[in-house]
Amino acid sequence: MSTAVKICGMSDEASVQAAAAAGADWLGFIIFPKSPRAVTLKRAAELARLKGSAKSVAVLVDPDDALLGDVLRILAPDIIQLHGGESPERCLDARHYAREGVWKAVPVSEPADVARAARYAGFADAILFDAKPPAGADRPGGWGEGYDYALLKGFDALPFVLAGGLTPETVGAAIKASGARAVDTVSGVESAPGMKDVAKIAAFIAAAKR
């Protein structure tokens, strides 16, 4: 079975079109001002019109109900990815604002982190396992750091997406180590923070789906 791919942090037309043409399954739009890949909801909606058959993912950090309402009204994403400290119950709330479901990001550095993700079963539709951010970080993801992907092997409480430090060169081995059926990259297909490289996008998708 081919691995599904999410390219996250989309902020320009060329990158969206390149990712869609290369076969990306999801395109992520980060609605969080502290991220170097942040876009407004209006801009995300404009870019999402170019996504072809890919599905849209709104990446949010501890959103309140007002923001969730705006996300639904302006972007109407297929998926909402919650990347903050949201509880299982909050994930269930957020389902009402997405067409297909909610992913909960869980930072990983040790086996106990993976085990704790099981508490989202029945509340989120998938877990996105990411690397823990550096101490004192002002945002929860997109740092380009990896971890021991083998920690995820055998996790079956609910579907999961592998993220954290993935590049065209490393994604194949990471899939093998983790058993992931879906992967996500942000900085791994950039030439600089927030600047996507269309050649790297195509190379990543090809390597993941090999």
Image (cartoon, helix red, strand yellow):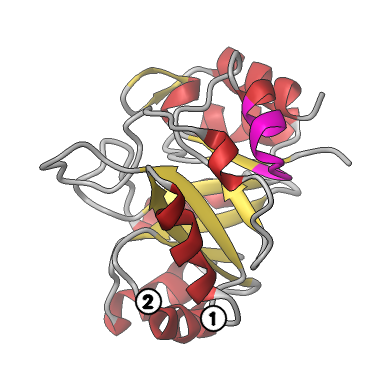
Q: Splitting the image into 4 quarters, where does residue 16 fall?
A: top right
Residue 199, image x and y in percent?
A: 60, 13
Residue at x 26% of width, y 36% of height? 36
Q: Residue at x 77, y 39 (%)?
A: 3
Image x and y of residue 51, in percent:
64, 45
Q: Nearer the viewer, residue 48 or 27?
A: 27
Q: Quadrant of residue 181?
A: top right
Q: What residue is pinned by disc 1?
A: 123
For this view, does 82 lie left or right of residue 129? left
Query: Which badge, 1 or 2, is on the more N-terminal residue?
Result: 2
Relative to residue 160, is residue 168 depicted above or below? above
Residue type marked 2: Leu
Question: What is the total number of numbered labels drawn onto the structure image?
Answer: 2
In the picture, the quarter occupied by the N terminus is: top right
Circle 1/circle 2 CB separation < 8 Å: no
Q: Nearer the viewer, residue 43 or 82?
A: 82
Quadrant of residue 105 within the rendered picture: bottom left
Mark number, residue 140: none
Q: Which mark is residue 68?
A: 2
In the displayed structure, 124 sits above or below 45; it is below
Which secondary structure lies at badge 1?
loop
**Disc 1 residue crowd, few under 14, some 14–19, many 20+, Cα 10 Å:** many
Instruction: Give the number of the mark in front: 1 or 2.
Output: 1
Q: Amino acid at mark 1?
A: Phe
